[in-house]
Image: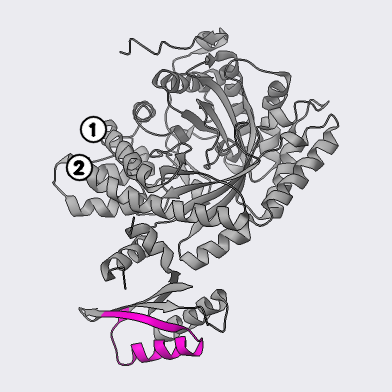
Amino acid sequence: MKAIVTVVGMDRVGIIGEICTTLAALQINIVDISQTVMRDFFTMIMLVDTGYANKTLDEIAEALHQKELEMGLSIRIQREDIFQAMHRI
Amino acid sequence: MLLSHSDIMQTIDMIAQQHLDIRTITMGITLLDCADPNPRDCANKIYDKICRCAQNLVPTGRRIEKELGIPIVNKRISVTPMALVAGACQTEDFAPFAVAMDRAGKECGVDFIGGFSALVQKGMTSGDRRLIASIPEALATTDIVCSSVNVGSTKAGINMDAVKRMGEVIKQTAALTADRGGMGCAKLVVFCNAVEDNPFMAGAFHGVGEPETVINVGVSGPGVVYHALQACKGQPLDVVAETIKKTAFHITRMGQLVAQEASKRLNVPFGVVDLSLAPTPAVGDSVARILEAMGLETCGGHGTTAALALLNDAVKKGGVMASSSVGGLSGAFIPVSEDEGMIAAASSGVLTLDKLEAMTCVCSVGLDMIAVPGDTPAATLSAIIADEAAIGMVNSKTTAVRLIPAVGKQVGDMVEFGGLLGEAPVMPVHPQSAEAFVARGGRIPAPMQSLKN
């Protein structure tokens, strides 16, 4: 399943590294990354493939939620379809 | 990445900041095959069939919610109008069927179950009469059952005997649920031109022209429209209409996606997406505030009807292209207690019952979730229903009345319902009597459909 991971929060050292490590541990492959920092605000969007993940989507969401609390950022994982449906005809 | 950074962040903002959600996935279930002369057998069949058909509805809804990352606020069930299902039963008391619906709904974990209903626009059958007589007790003894009665239509006219009866039923329901702020009345709606595929409560029922089971979805999103309008301050109204249209398109695409997913996973045909813009009592999720964003000082002042007409039409135009099948009520809702801006406007005295009535001429659905003084006579309630039904009948649109006589309360007091139902200020009604008019009964004939003026 293709999913979009979005990470939003105050910029600091090591955000990308930590997120990527978390995803790697879950066997989630990162297909594409886009990232910007606007006025100290970090925004990262990742297109990922959960096809080989070693956990269910519920467990993945839970693991990312833990990370979210730990890092003080907002982290979401959503199926790519929702964005396609809204922005592509 | 095929999607742009800004598209993705726009979606995230809509969900996280602007209250975008799917208001409801509603599963329609026919209960026509549950008819049985023995009331106990009939109630058992109703319970069994609802549980069998809807057992996976809530878990499936939750899964979709999680995967797509969009809240699905309610999961609901609508069933065949109970007057048709239980008409064959040899009993005067239909309340046990509402109890069966309540138990089944709770077993399935849904938020509401609608269809304790009767369609009496032209006249009442024995089943209709017994169902209507059972409404107060049914709503007082259940928690999640919703009831509706259709008293008029453009083709049949208005059944004034039923209108008179419903004024009394609303009073009785309020009295029986007085300890809960008249909560029973929040689950009872009186329609003209009721639709068969409405996913919204309290008026949802599964019409006889519908399939065995069906999935209908209702979207929400006043907060998203409000936010979009902040970007076109001072611009001409055609720019406003275009902005709303585009926003409605985005919102409805969500509904379509969720409806298709639910339909596929539950193996139940997809019915319609209802385009209604449904508010919540949360700050930032109000239809009234959209009207004010167009330039009105307070919702309910002059200009409100025109602003609402624009909003309602633009929502439909944007939504229609976004979904393969649109139906239900499809328009902007203006429930007073469920909309933070409406509550404020009504509390300040600017928004009156008369203005709300005018507003219902151009939008969906009607006089909705309005608290009136507890000592309002039944005939006055009936007259309000008749006025609203006349608007629906003449304009070939659905109109509805959901009034809550607040027992022991006077104008200006607040009535709290909690959750999505919110809180309502008690609004004044005209003290002049309509007793003699309502007491006449009979029928208001169906109107001309030509020579429109």
Q: Residue at x 33, y 54 (%)?
A: B224
Q: How is the image coloured?
A: one colour
Q: Could you say which is closer to the camera, residue B269 or residue B227?
A: B269
Q: Are marks 1 and 2 on the same chain?
A: yes
Quick check: is A22 in the magenta stretch?
yes
Judge whether residue B263 is colored magenta.
no
> Can the viewer see residue B78?
yes
Q: Is residue B333 left or right of residue B164?
A: left
Q: Amino acid at mark 2?
A: Gly
B14 shown above or below B190:
below
**Residue shown at the point (83%, 25%) measured from the top left:** B90
Horizontal side of B354 relative to B48 (left or right) equals: left
Instruction: Tell me where the magenta segment starts and ends, as one range.
Output: A9-35
Answer with left or right where residue B174 lies relative to residue B370: right
Which residue position is annotated with label 2?
A: B295
SS class, disc 2:
loop
Instruction: Name above or below for residue B2 compared with residue A67.
Output: above
- Identify the image quadrant of residue B37: top right
Residue A71 in the image, given as x and y percentages of width and height: 40, 86
> Residue B126 appears in which quarter of the rendering?
top right
The residue tagged 1 is B303
Disc 1/disc 2 C-alpha distance (Å): 9 Å
Q: Position of residue A69 (x, y in %)?
A: 45, 82
Residue B407 visible in this rendered orientation of the protein: no
Q: Circle 2: is it few (<14), some (14-19), or many (20+) Cα within 10 Å?
A: some
